[in-house]
Image (cartoon, coloured by chain):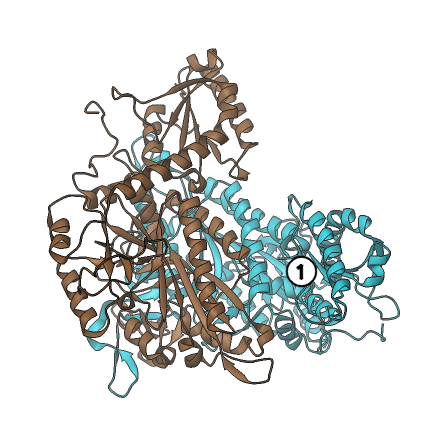
Chain colours: A cyan, B brown
């Protein structure tokens, strides 16, 4: 493998954080905007987000939700109503205090003191409280339930240390909010949406995840239960990729979401909320990226197949013939389907050397690159590069030579194979990096302090401590820079003592470093 | 017609403004949010927006644009750079001054004085300046041009008097921004996107529009040319439904968008911007609504066909048979296409009387409602209601009785017919309400002051006055509550004097009251 001259300057093994930044830049996904904590999402990055949106939106609509849109501004009074929610959120938020600017006389603009808002407005960090107000208006009777809404929106949480896609002051997400007649139905819905997220992560993003419940101290502010999907990144850290919350009647009480039951009695609703964000793109990068850049799973690739004619700009007749040859392949491919949708194929005839363009698309992670030179055309063939199998054993680009007809017909199945292969690689890596034989705190500390670049996750037994005992455990973990990720739904039965408290275990939990 | 008992309480002819509000409420499109100037867009209203988005996004991508996402916050310094833009925009905007809240000790939250921003941020009213910054980074050489971007986003312009969809402090829109090597290409692109808007308005929204250039005094702040599409509402007022701006080198100069030409010389780019917003939904309401509620053109209807079984809740066997009968129709229809997309059909089996549900869908404006009762089923038939032909001459709901097979096969063509019919009605009404024989100011004043509920538009001759002369004309028009809408692209040649200045005319313009 040492012969390979990789397309990035930084290798994952050498400096994962710097590699992450380089992928974002080399794949042209996003960049710093110059506005504190906010990024510019560029076409290839936004195209991936549009694909995730489209696929997840279909899943959300299939489970009976309608999309709505709620105001970006939330009055302060809304935050004052739900005590725990305030504590959790009322810290770092963007606060609007004026509604006009004026010139200060020196050519500078300043907020107009005469246009100060009576009550400041907060740019939404999440919309529980404002949607709660709407639900209180919309729900009157048991016949109005369940009420299932979703919104795609931007939200702002003022972050001191930002990292593109993973933690930015402004990010894009969807937030679902539902109201139900009783706890059982609301809890079932919380899990149903968790399953939607699992399916989206694993089937659309080819990103294996562990679905489970967050421990008490990691709950969303105001929630009774918080569930998450957690993915293992290539540095062994966990990424929380989506959460689903059962909110009990806390928000219903704060917002007055009540219904008249069939007996004419007023009851509080049980509500849920759940969201995933542009953070998922960070997960895709750290799950599928390699030392040559990003590898985008075909289901979410803005373009699945790139056709690159090797135009030479010398002989116009030859270039025209080559372009026509490629265009006919493009047309055939564009008429085909993969994953139940039209194939997304692009013929790139822009000026520039084909080899340079090839490496651009390698770094972007286009799943299949088809190059066509004069010799290919003479043989009625093409040269095909799979992004997930880029190199030969001796460090050359691993081109397959195919007839044009073969290429035209194998692509849908090839894309499905690439999708499976990306998932399988990630799942195998994750499974190989879960440690299950840790039985006390010292062993845990040693495992994570061993200097291994990839300590992965530890699945350990847990007595579900509370109160001061829990605080002590959290503090110990914090010193090791570890957190309890979640209680996996499909764990083996417990058979021993909690590694933290020594008490009989009641659950298994994943412990890991996390983003 | 006097026998008809319409589904709304207010008629267009009686109080158009109140009628507009009632349609929004009766069709369940949107509602006041409780947050000043912001609305909640409800499922049926947001569903229409999603349709407009999807269709327009395809058109924008077909013209070679990529979607991106830029920050919601814009530093004040950006506004200070482009003088005209400041004058036009630096007034009513939401200004973020703090990034944290604290408890004030009495249970209330207040902005934390310790978390005051060094430089306030503005919630974007439009993104020319922040996208200009990005373009300055992205454009280096003539090879990078044209650069064509688009973004779908929320924007905020603090409005004192708001009206749902037409003027709200927060609204949703798309804003396209492009950079070109020279004026000719940029101007051509400005017109190309105007044509995209015309096609979207007329073909997707069935809303006839006049495309033309705005007079100098109605230009976007900082633009050299502003073009618009203008639609006539049913009260005769004009609605500006979309604008496209040629910005010359003004924003390029302010942001430093320069390229090296093939000779190695640094040149300023010529830029364009163009946008349409949720305001278009207001246009759809006031173009197609009638005294029974909204009529949604089939291309943008969230559901094109509603199937309502007349379930009686008495005989379970009968209800089940009816539901199965309707489901088989739904499945057949869902397998068909209209306008090149899958037909959007819904079977509504929720509890409630079929007649009450029918009128809900009438008010929402679903294009086709199919009701099925026991007798229909016995005859293997259905009863079909066209929303655009709702009443018989004697004031009854105008049901067509059809066999199920006929219904299953006629729908795609019926939807196309409804789409055409809505456009034709609106175009005929518009054309009948344009006055072309006004030759002086007095006649203009008389026409619009005549107490007619529907004075429509006047097409008059115009000498393109400037400076103080223009100011005087604008002032006169203002007294009559009139504005110059645009200079239509396809007007007849001029053949007389300007009605304002008496000078030889050089153009024809539309004059109207406007939203």
Q: Can residue A484 be seen in the rendering of this structure?
A: no
Specify the quadrant of the image occupied by residue B7. top left
- Horizontal placement of A476 versus A102: left or right? right
Residue A193 in picture, x, y percent from top left: 53, 47
Name which quarter of the figure residue B14 lies in.
Answer: top left
Residue located at (73% from left, 56% from top):
A324
Q: Which of the 4 image quarters holds residue B197?
A: bottom left
Q: Is residue A263 left or right of residue A480?
A: left
Residue A217 visible in rendering:
yes
Position of the N terminus of chain A by quadrant:
bottom right
Q: Where's residue B196, x and y in %?
A: 45, 54
Q: Which residue is mark 1?
A: A296
Residue depicted at 43% across the width and 73% down the height: B130
Label 1 SS: loop
Q: Chain of mark 1?
A: A
Q: Residue furthest bottom?
A: A106
Q: Which residue is farthest right?
A: A394
- Please tell me which residue lies in front, A199 or B7: B7
Horizontal and vertical percent for residue A67?
44, 47
Q: Residue at x 78, y 61 (%)?
A: A372
In depth, the one of A245 and A393 nearer the eye is: A393
Between B499 and B119, the residue placed more toward the observer is B499
Q: Report crowding for label 1: few under 14, some 14 to 19, many 20 or more residues within 10 A (C-alpha).
A: many
Looking at the picture, how far across and down is residue B58, in whole percent?
Answer: 52, 52
What count of labels does the image hold?
Answer: 1
Q: Is residue A8 above or below residue B476?
A: below
Q: Residue furthest front?
A: B495
Q: Quadrant of the C terminus of chain A?
A: bottom right
């Amino acid at each position: 493998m040492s012969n390979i001259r990789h397309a990035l300057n930084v290798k994952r093994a050498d400096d994962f954080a710097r590699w992450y930044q380089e992928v974002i830049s080399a794949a042209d996904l996003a960049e710093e905007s110059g506005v504190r904590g906010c990024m510019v999402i560029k076409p290839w990055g936004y195209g991936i987000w549009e694909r995730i949106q489209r696929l997840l939106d279909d899943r959300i609509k299939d489970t009976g939700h309608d999309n709505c849109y709620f105001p970006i501004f939330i009055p302060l009074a809304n935050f004052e109503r739900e005590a725990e929610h305030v504590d959790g959120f009322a810290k770092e938020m963007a606060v609007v205090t004026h509604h006009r600017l004026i010139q200060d006389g020196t050519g500078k603009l300043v907020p107009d003191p005469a246009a100060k808002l009576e009550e400041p407005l907060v740019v939404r960090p999440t919309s529980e409280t404002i949607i709660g107000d709407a639900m209180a208006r919309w729900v009157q009777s048991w016949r109005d339930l369940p009420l299932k809404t979703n919104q795609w929106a931007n939200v702002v949480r003022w972050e001191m240390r930002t990292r593109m896609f993973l933690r930015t002051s402004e990010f894009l997400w969807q937030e679902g909010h539902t109201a139900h007649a009783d706890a059982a139905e609301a809890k079932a819905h919380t899990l149903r949406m968790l399953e939607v997220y699992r399916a989206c992560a694993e089937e659309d993003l080819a990103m294996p995840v562990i679905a489970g419940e967050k421990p008490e101290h990691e709950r969303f502010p105001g929630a009774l239960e918080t569930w998450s999907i957690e993915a293992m990144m290539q540095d062994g850290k966990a990424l929380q990729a989506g959460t689903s919350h059962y909110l009990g009647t806390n928000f219903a009480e704060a917002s007055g979401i009540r219904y008249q039951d069939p007996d004419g009695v007023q009851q509080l609703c049980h509500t849920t909320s759940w969201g995933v964000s542009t953070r998922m793109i960070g997960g895709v990068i750290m799950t599928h990226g390699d030392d040559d850049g990003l590898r985008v799973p075909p289901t979410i690739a803005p373009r699945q197949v790139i056709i690159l004619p090797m135009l030479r700009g010398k002989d116009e007749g030859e270039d025209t013939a080559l372009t026509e040859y490629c265009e006919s392949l493009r047309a055939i491919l564009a008429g085909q389907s993969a994953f139940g949708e039209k194939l997304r194929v692009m013929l790139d005839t822009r000026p520039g050397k084909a080899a340079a363009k090839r490496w651009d698309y390698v770094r972007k992670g286009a799943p299949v690159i088809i190059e066509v030179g004069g010799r290919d055309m003479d043989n009625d063939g093409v040269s095909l590069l799979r992004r997930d199998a880029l190199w030969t054993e001796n460090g050359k680009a691993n081109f397959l030579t195919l007839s044009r007809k073969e290429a035209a017909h194998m692509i849908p199945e090839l894309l499905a194979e690439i999708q499976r292969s990306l998932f399988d690689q990630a799942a195998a890596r994750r499974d190989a990096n879960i440690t299950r034989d840790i039985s006390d705190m010292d062993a845990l500390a040693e495992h994570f302090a061993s200097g291994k670049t990839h300590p992965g996750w530890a699945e350990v037994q847990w007595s579900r401590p509370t109160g001061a005992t829990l605080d002590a455990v959290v503090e110990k973990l914090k010193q090791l820079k570890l957190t309890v990720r979640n209680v996996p739904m499909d764990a083996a039965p417990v058979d021993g003592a909690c590694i933290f408290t020594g008490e009989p275990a009641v659950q298994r939990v994943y412990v890991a470093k996390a983003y």
